[in-house]
Image (cartoon, helix red, strand yellow):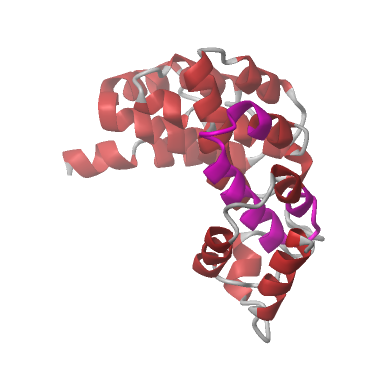
Amino acid sequence: MNEAKTILEQIKYLKPTTVPTFALRSLQIVPGGYGEGDVLYGVPVPMLRKIAKEHRSVSLKTCEKLLQQSLHEARYTALVLLNEKFPKKPKEVLDIYLRNTKFVNNWDLVDLSAPHIVGKSCLVTGNNNVILNLADKENLWENRIAVVSTLPLIKSGQCALTFQLCERFLHHPHPLIHKACGWMLREISKRDAESVLEFFRRHCDAPSVMREYALECVKRTRD
């Protein structure tokens, strides 16, 4: 049986009559949006996770085939499956991920997968070159993957790379990168607020959205 086809049919079966407007707007699958041209059914995430759970034994080949589909929900399901498979086959999963980053092309897909695949790989190997190479790319989503992948490092007390990337992306042209940087800085602030405050003292020209995201917890603590 073609497992990828079976999963696609299950997703299609759950397709609502109309795609929720909030979902299209959230993912910017609108004319002129960064998700323009993507195909979205509007199937809720819990249902996609349930499908992935039912098919957790599928092959990596099937996961890669799903990841290369034009349907957004198929790519999401593929990434849930790859996250699940990473602990047992880290190198194979990372290889699939890196050769298919062009399909990890919206913030929800990046945020779902980057920490669990790229980030954990770098944490285990102690080699951050994968993240640095993605940061070097002239691609919005690969840049976001780089930033968000530092989350496991932050949680293990390694924050230097995050600060390095945030400084590097201070003048990135896209707000999604500023938001990602702000998110990671906020995670650092939960552990070391002073280091984040010092970052912004040194970089007074930091984008306001980065600053707002980063200092949310600090402001809440002081209020």
Q: Is residue 173 above or below residue 63?
A: above
Front position in the image: 92 or 187: 92
Q: Is residue 50 above or below residue 173?
A: below
Front position in the image: 170 or 62: 62
Whole-percent x and y of residue 112? 54, 47
Residue, far front: 1
Q: Is residue 41 left or right of residue 44?
A: right
Q: Residue at x 74, y 51 (%)?
A: 62
Q: Is residue 190 left or right of residue 37?
A: left
Q: Residue at x 55, y 63 (%)?
A: 54
In the rendered image, which quarter is residue 142 located in?
top right
Q: Is residue 12 left or right of residue 175?
A: right
Q: Is residue 101 visible?
A: yes
The count of marks equals 0
Whole-percent x and y of residue 77? 63, 57
Q: Residue at x 60, y 59 (%)?
A: 55
In the rendered image, which quarter is residue 186 located in?
top left
Whole-percent x and y of residue 180? 53, 38
Magenta stretch encompasses residue 195: no
Magenta stretch encompasses residue 87: yes
Residue, far bottom: 17
Q: Is residue 143 visible?
A: no
- Quadrant assignment for the C terminus: top left
Q: Main secondary structure of the magenta part?
A: helix
Whole-percent x and y of residue 221? 19, 40
- Quadrant assignment for the N terminus: bottom right
Q: Is residue 201 above or below residue 58?
A: above
Q: Which residues are magenta?
A: 65-93
